[in-house]
Amino acid sequence: MTKLNIMWIIFGILTTILFFADLKLSSRAKEITQKESVILCLFWVSVAVLFGLLIGTMLGQQKMIEFYTGYLIEYTLSMDNMFVFLLIFSYFSIPKKYQPKILTWGIIGAVLMRFIFLFAGVKLLNAFHWLIYVFGAILILSAIKMAVQKEEGMDPSKNPLLKLIGKFIPIENTIKTGDFFTVKNKVLHATPLFAALIVIETSDIIFAVDSIPAILAVSRDTFVVYTSNVFAIVGLRALYFFLSSLIDYFRFLKLGISIILFYVGVKMLISDFYHITPLISLASIIFVLAVSMILSIIVKEKKINA
């Protein structure tokens, strides 16, 4: 058995255990406090760091650096996604105690979808190298759009999949329990929790248009690409509650994320002419992320007097 096969087995066992543990925790209707979200964030990041070290031991330092770079890119892009999730929960008036359950099932769905998209992306790039320029252009356009566009105008009710489901099963307007479905007058109804889950899942498909080309700019190794993506995704539940409690302190985070997207897009476009090492990419992403957070803290927002 090769070292790569051993790593796949370790990854499968580890993620299965962590997923079941997360499902057990999210099954209880309980609001996650800021302290708990910080502890959970540190836990998931620590697991990813240790797994990266194991990759370095088993597969080499280069693969380890690619894993950390891919993980940081996906985790950083996920921060912007969390603000969209905040709007979705607000739209459907989902109580905070039920939000962990929705996010957990949303993460499981995202992991399955990314498995398909990432493997397809690797195959496509290996078969059609010119697609790297298409992916690079998508990232640059996404970066510009992210920098200038606001999410306030988002309307989850216009989600096409949600409209389609509404034709087959009624969607209840009130939230009485933490269930995805309820029976009313002997008729099965979907609850707002299920509606929010559908919008989050379909939103993740849109997010994948950015994140998948970005991570493929770092590595074409299927194992590195998928594992770094999954470890970033599984920590999103804790990240959401952490960021939602500190949302007012990260005014420049969105700009920082758009700069990172732009950088990765340019990296893809020039990859045939100039090679940027994963270590330089990792350092650049950490620098931009750190500067955006520091600026968010030290630069005070101007208040307009009425």
Image: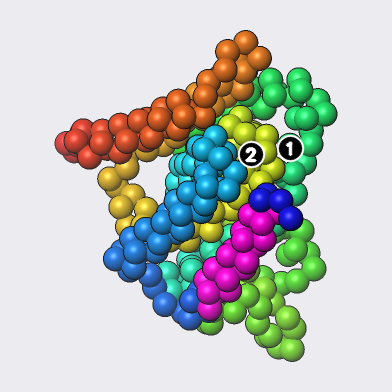
Residue shown at 68% from the left, 85% from the top = 183
Residue 210: x and y in percent read 60, 36
Labels 2 and 1 touching (C-beta < 8 A): yes
What span is in magenta? 5-24
Q: Secondary structure at mark 1?
A: helix
Q: In the figure, is residue 30 to the left or right of 4?
A: left
Q: Which residue is mark 1?
A: 121
Snapshot colouring: rainbow
Residue 260: x and y in percent read 47, 30
Residue shown at 44% from the left, 51% from the top = 49
Q: Is residue 6 magenta?
A: yes
Give the number of marks.
Answer: 2
The amino acid on which the numbered mark 2 sits, given as a three-letter code, is: Ile
User: Which quarter of the figure has residue 157?
Assistant: bottom right
Residue shown at 64% from the left, 27% from the top = 138
Relative vertical location of residue 257 with respect to residue 3 in this rendering, above or below: above
